Image (cartoon, rainbow, N blue to C red):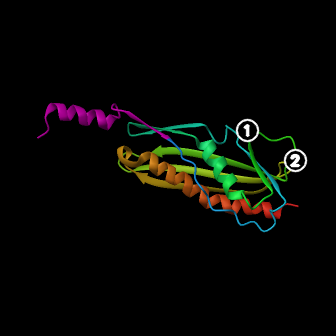
Amino acid sequence: MMRPSMIAIAALVATGSIACTHEHTFANVTPARAQLQRGGARRVAIIMDERLVHTRYETSTDGHTFVFYNAPALVANALQGALAGSVAMVQAFPGVPSSGFDAQVIPELGIEATGMLNHHCKVRFALTVADARGQPVVRRELETDETFVPVANGPAACEAAVLSAFNGVAYQALAGIDGLR
């Protein structure tokens, strides 16, 4: 038999009235190198548009709010690391550089926590490779989904989903640099 205090706590939890916030800063990663065949002389600009990759993500589910920081640094460093040694130069910019680059790489990232009994972190990662004029050459997009327990591994599950989406898209899209004239 449940005591009145246990019933009240159960009701608060069920309605999401008891809330907690989980904050997480994404760590930088060391990605595998992109295997480009003709990228050696290419100069590549990574366009880190705040509208497409946010400095702060906040998503809530089942009384838990997850706040993620450092996504632009994670994505930019991962892309720079993947391209290092495969192209002549790679540099990240907050907007489109004026000139001097053979290719533009434009990432997009979305993060959303969902669920009540089964919790999920859904991540959508897209990567567009454009030529020097900004005309898209290739675009790849992937949505990944990691199941988690909010109090145990919510932030880690979301980070795993981000890295899984990155790995599932980045190398296919970056191969588009080889096709540039």
Q: Nearer the viewer, residue 94 or 60?
A: 94
CB contact under 8 Å: marks 1 and 2:
no
Left or right: 95 in relation to 27: right
Q: Nearer the viewer, residue 114 or 31?
A: 31
Q: Whole-Å distance between the Cαs marked 1 and 2?
A: 16 Å
Where, by quadrant of the figure, is residue 111 drawn? top right
Q: Magenta segment, which residues?
A: 1-24
The kind of residue on which mark 1 rests is: Pro
Residue lying at the far left of the rendered structure: 1
Q: Which of the two labelled residues, at mark 1 and mark 2, occupies the earlier sequence position?
A: 1
Residue at (26% x, 34% y) in the render: 11
Left or right: 6 in relation to 117: left
Left or right: 150 in relation to 49: left
Residue lying at the far bottom of the rendered structure: 37
Q: Which mark is residue 100?
A: 2
Please give the residue where the numbered disc 1 appears in the rendered image: 94
Quarter of the figure with the N terminus: top left
Q: Which of 1 and 47 is in front in this view?
A: 47
Quarter of the figure with the C terminus: bottom right
Residue at (42% x, 53% y) in the render: 147
* Residue 170 pos. (x, y %): 66, 58
Image label count: 2
* Residue 39 pos. (x, y %): 80, 62
145, above or below 59, in the image: below
